[in-house]
Amino acid sequence: MSVPLVLAIDGGNSKTDLALVQADGEVLSLVRGPLSSPHHLGVDGCLGVLDDLLAKALAEAGLLNGDGPVAEVGQLLLAGVDFPSEEQEMRAAATERRLASRVSVGNDTFAVLRAGTGQGWGVAVVCGAGINCVGVAPDGRQARFPALGSITGDWGGGYDVGLEAVSAAGRREDGRGERPSLEQAVPAQFGLGTPTELAEAIHRGRIAIRRVIELAPVVFREAASDPVSASIVERLAEEVVVLVRVALERLELTDAPVEVALGGGLMQSGNSRLIKAVEAGLRKVAPAATAHVTSSPPVVGAALLGLDELDAGTEAQERARRELGESFERMEIEMQPRDGRQ
């Protein structure tokens, strides 16, 4: 093929998006599959998911999967790739599998940063099931966090918010806590009547503990009238601001007009209380910074990083952003559950 291809991958803890994009910005295919995080699947399991998705993308694009790599550049941005040693291991394995002629591997926060900023530098905070942050200076210096949860001092994301809600509901029921509306709303989310019933269901394995992430929207909703829920949202905002502050301090950009991209499901939920609290906190620690919720999906960031590597111009970048955004919207609509009504 005369026009070089970019293989762009956003691999998360719940799903994976893979796109094939030409160097001129034309999107040839966009496909979605299951989680591909090597932290959960291992390197071989991750590559198995990516191989299957690449074959699907090639078929959708009408391309043949020959002996050599189809793509000139591969950007594999994956959740669970948190240390340089993990990046090296994944890059070596992906290169051996010939996913692309040149393979780059990084954490999926880099996809959010590139998708959510105009120049590709700044700070990105991803707040989905968990929380993570990355900062990149104009000269390429990076500020990163391991983001391994409580063992590295992290709190935030849907899991922690949901678990906090379960705890608050339980403490109120037995008299140790304040009276939050969560006492009724939390068990009701799972079709149960009391926090104790929910605790027993989780303890006995009838409800997976991971499902507490489903409670984040409940907390956001109840925060309008419930002080306990509001305090959980405030704590989440404070954690986001602290991550941004530390990243900017490490990069010596505290006084610079830095873009702060907010990504992930909790940030994109549209909860005004959370976003306003983050913006207010940032004004205190980095007055020149501007924060916004990303509108482009992370796979766009992976594609733009690949085009950066090919020295693609602004026109190609804008085309890729536009076409991938349109393809993503169509894919989301097609994947919505059908209710059987005409």
Image: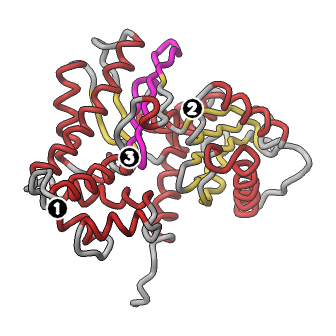
Q: The disc labelled 1 sits on which kind of residue?
A: Glu
As drawn, 53 above or below 115:
below
**Residue 226: x %, y % from top left:** 10, 54
Residue pictured at 9% horizontal, 56% vertical: 179
Q: Is residue 38 left or right of residue 294?
A: right
Task: Judge by depth and name the residue closer to the eye, 136 or 177.
Answer: 177
Task: Judge by depth and name the residue closer to the eye, 103 or 78.
Answer: 78
**Residue 232: x %, y % from top left:** 21, 45
Q: Please check the rendered image and state whether residue 139 is part of the magenta-colored stretch, yes or no.
A: yes
Q: Main secondary structure of the magenta part?
A: strand
Mark 2 or mark 3, earlier in chain = 2
**Residue 122: x %, y % from top left:** 41, 24
Q: Confirm or deny contact between disc 1 and disc 3 (CB under 8 A).
A: no
Q: Residue furthest top?
A: 252
Q: Mark 1 — residue?
A: 173
Q: Mark 3 — residue?
A: 295
Which quadrant holds the N terminus? Answer: top right
Which quadrant holds the C terminus? Answer: bottom left
Q: Confirm or deny contact between disc 2 and disc 1 (CB under 8 A).
A: no
As drawn, 116 above or below 162:
above
> Distance between the Cα atoms at labels 2 and 1?
39 Å
As drawn, 321 above or below 203:
above
Q: Mark 2 — residue?
A: 82
Q: Which residues are magenta?
A: 121-143
Q: Find residue 2 and report its image quarter.
A: top right
Q: Secondary structure at mark 3?
A: loop
